[in-house]
Amino acid sequence: MPVVIRMGKSRVPELLAKKGKTQVDLAEFLEVTEGFVSQVCSGKSKLSPLNMKKTAYFLGVRMDDLNEWFITENGATQELK
């Protein structure tokens, strides 16, 4: 069976809270609208690879920390940490 890795929900809201930052702060840093950041936080939109890198830098985390990640192997799914 193939191994499948998929992206789960955004962790940006919790990371912003941990760092004491707001969606407005992130929107200004990325030079995007607050509405777009809100859509990213709610899972309605995705960040481009460049904005993922910039967001990770802004929050002091790795790019893969911005989302939940899951792996399915041999029919069993588990979260990648």
Image (spheres, helix red, strand yellow):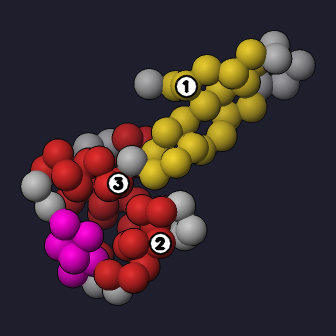
Q: Which residue is mark 2?
A: 39
For the residue marked with disc 1, what is the amino acid? Glu
In 3D space, how far apart are the residues under numbered discs 2 and 1 (Cα atoms)? 23 Å
Q: Which residue is mark 1?
A: 79
Give the side of residue 3 with respect to residue 22, left or right.
right
Residue found at x 19% / y 66% = 22
Residue 21: which disc?
Answer: none
The verdict on residue 25 being magenta is yes
Q: Which quadrant: the N terminus?
A: top right
For the residue marked with disc 3, what is the amino acid? Val
Give the side of residue 43 with respect to residue 52, left or right.
right
Locate residue 17, reporting x and y percent.
19, 52
- In the displayed structure, 73 sits above or below 17; it is above
Classed neighbour count for the residue bearing mark 3: other residues with Cα under 10 Å, few (<14), some (14–19), many (≥20): many
Q: Which residue is mark 3?
A: 12
Looking at the rendering, the stretch of residues picked out in magenta corresponds to 22-28
Residue found at x 30% / y 61% = 55
